[in-house]
Amino acid sequence: MLRWLVAGLLVAHGLVHIAVWASAKVAEGQGSTPDRSWILGTQHSLVLGMTYLVVALFAVAGVALVFQVGWWPQMTVVAAGASLLLVALFPGAIVGPWIVAPIAINVTLIAAVWLSWPESLMTG
């Protein structure tokens, strides 16, 4: 049961990236600039590519967890790292103090894998 819940949360976290970085309507409503990087300038294609890559990585991690594939923890760390990179390069997509949420979620995922918590997920 816990495995399915965590897998669903991994996939859901990945899908949220589409709403934040790939949805023009959400960006207009928030007054955000999801394709504007503080270091790279406006990079619409790059932000879309990174967004869909992050979504795919989290989806693969979630499915791998459901099927108890041995490399799901590593895939989770890669997905969370890619998500952190997306947040770092394109923070304009997230307005105000909400920027803390994806950082906290991704750091928590990496820490949980590193600490092998919960043990029941790691051992199957």
Image (cartoon, rainbow, N blue to C red):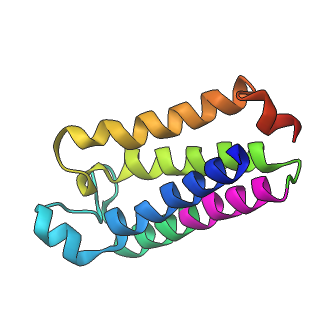
Tally of numbered discs: 0
Question: Residue at left 52%, top 70%?
Answer: 52
Residue 116 lies in quadrant: top right
Question: Residue at left 39%, top 48%?
Answer: 87
Question: Residue at left 32%, top 50%?
Answer: 39
x, y percentage for residue 98? 25, 42
- 60 above or below 23? above
- 32 above or below 3? below
For the residue pair 55 and 10, the one nearer the viewer reads as 10
Question: Residue at left 51%, top 40%?
Answer: 106
The magenta span reads 55-67
Q: Is residue 84 left or right of residue 58?
A: left
Q: Is residue 116 left or right of residue 80?
A: right
Residue 54 lies in quadrant: bottom right
Q: Is residue 61 magenta?
A: yes
Q: Is residue 18 left or right of residue 59?
A: left
Judged by its main secondary structure, the magenta piece is helix
Residue 41 lies in quadrant: bottom left
- 21 above or below 117? below
Quadrant, the C terminus: top right
x, y percentage for residue 107? 52, 32
Q: Is residue 15 magenta?
A: no
For the residue pair 49 and 119, the one nearer the viewer reads as 119
x, y percentage for residue 114? 71, 27
x, y percentage for residue 42? 28, 66
